[in-house]
């Protein structure tokens, strides 16, 4: 395996890549009926109003080349360009700015492998409060540096869920801080749903929306927003085949444990919570699994044709579409690129799988 450096987002996009924010059709305040379940569309809209002064409205990009490869029209919601480098600031900011003054004075705490921790540290900084972040000692260095840069107070622990929860509980006992869980939290879920809210405001006639799934916060918020605004839309969760617990959980009807195998998509190793599991069972159409090789290929394709860097977890939602796993050729598909935080000097590249080969393979499969 070789290593290369991917470009960060380059303003000199080629003619096949466009920002399509001018396609806005209806307002985020459009009246619709409320879905059943918690949170609902109104809580997502409330979250949007609360956090919009503090976050970026990320661009939606398209590429003719990637459309040809996928056999569909893809609309990439670029949360890799979001503040803190991922969608996580949406949920973290909604949770932090929903706190009462008394709660905020105690600070916040969470456990996170990186992106949620960085986002919570930034949200706390924006509100002027303390944030304690429990981080496994094998977390990517780029994510640890981000937490430190935003002023988060890091507590390292062993890379197990039990160790993370125990360390967070210890901080809670000693500080009285408010726990902001990475995904098992209604305010966090509502905040994450604002990415799909923006996407569907700009591209309201999508046939499908794809989002990665780990603990289920982003996919839950995406499903609530998408199914509420456009009931006929298909919502697809995407996860690594090496971390397929969400797929197994929806198939079995109960929350399944994490897979024993490892994945390059380090941000997608959590398991569902009862809260997110219930939402996914009610609103997600299916889970698509992608291989490690397909994830890396998708990172390369996005870097080349969108001129954007995405982390492996951020490329997972695109991978199912780019590798024609969805069976919806000719459709309009929204893809949430969830994050772009990765060490630029150590980007894995698979050999022998360039765009020409992918196009040849796609042509052979269509014969």
Image (cartoon, rainbow, N blue to C red):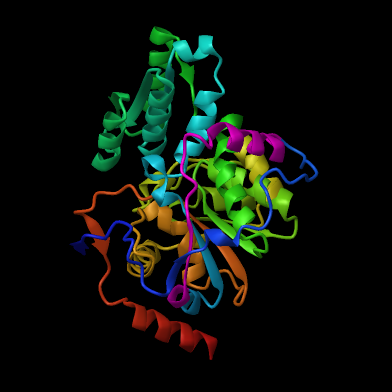
Give the residue displayed 36% in from the left and 47% down from the top.
266
Can you say whether 98 is above or below 207 in the image? above
Can you say whether 109 is above or below 116 in the image? above
Towards the viewer: 282 or 333: 333
Residue 39 lies, in percent from the top left, at 67, 35
Give the residue displayed 43% in from the left and 47% down from the top.
268
Relative placement, left or right, of 77 versus 152 is: right
**How many marks do you count on the picture?**
0
> Is residue 227 inside the magenta stretch?
no
Give the residue displayed 44% in from the left and 19% down from the top.
108
> Is residue 54 inside the magenta stretch?
yes
As drawn, the residue found furthest toward the right would be 33
Residue 283 lies, in percent from the top left, at 69, 49
Classify residue 302 by image quadrant.
Answer: bottom left
Classify residue 235 by image quadrant.
Answer: bottom right
Give the residue displayed 66% in from the left and 42% down from the top.
279
Q: Is residue 141 visible in the rendered structure shown here?
A: yes
As drawn, the residue found furthest toward the bottom would be 367
Residue 238 lies, in percent from the top left, at 52, 56
> Which stretch did the figure color magenta?
38-66
């Amino acid at each position: 395996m070789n290593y290369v450096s991917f470009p960060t987002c380059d303003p000199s996009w080629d003619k096949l890549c466009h920002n399509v924010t001018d396609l806005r059709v209806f307002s985020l305040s459009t009246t619709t009926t409320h879905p059943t379940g918690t949170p609902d569309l109104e809580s997502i809209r409330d979250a949007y109003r609360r956090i919009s002064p503090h976050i970026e409205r990320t661009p939606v990009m398209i590429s003719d080349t990637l459309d040809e490869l996928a056999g569909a029209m893809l609309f990439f919601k670029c949360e890799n360009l979001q503040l803190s480098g991922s969608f996580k600031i949406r949920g973290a900011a909604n949770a932090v700015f929903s706190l009462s003054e008394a709660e905020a004075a105690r600070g916040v705490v969470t456990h996170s492998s990186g992106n949620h921790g960085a986002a919570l540290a930034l949200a706390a900084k924006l509100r002027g409060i303390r944030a304690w972040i429990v981080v496994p000692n094998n977390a990517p260095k780029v994510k640890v540096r981000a937490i430190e840069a935003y002023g988060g107070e890091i507590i390292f622990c062993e890379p197990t869920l039990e160790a993370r929860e125990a360390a967070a509980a210890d901080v809670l006992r000693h500080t009285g801080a408010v726990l902001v869980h990475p995904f098992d939290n209604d305010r966090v879920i509502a905040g994450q749903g604002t990415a799909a809210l923006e996407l569907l405001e700009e591209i309201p006639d999508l046939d499908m929306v794809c989002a990665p799934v780990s603990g289920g916060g982003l996919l839950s918020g995406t499903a609530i927003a998408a199914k509420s605004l456009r009931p006929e839309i298909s919502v697809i969760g995407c996860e690594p085949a090496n971390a397929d617990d969400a797929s197994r959980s929806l198939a079995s009807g109960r929350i399944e444990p994490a897979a024993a195998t490892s994945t390059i998509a380090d941000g997608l190793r959590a398991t569902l919570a009862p809260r997110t599991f219930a939402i996914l069972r009610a609103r997600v159409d299916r889970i698509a699994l992608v291989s490690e090789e397909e994830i890396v290929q998708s990172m390369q394709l996005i870097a080349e044709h969108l001129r954007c860097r995405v982390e492996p977890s951020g490329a997972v939602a695109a991978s199912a579409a780019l590798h024609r796993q969805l069976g919806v050729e000719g459709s309009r598909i929204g893809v949430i690129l969830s994050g772009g935080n990765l060490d630029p000097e150590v980007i894995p590249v698979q050999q022998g799988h360039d765009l020409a080969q992918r196009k040849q393979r796609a042509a052979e499969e269509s014969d």
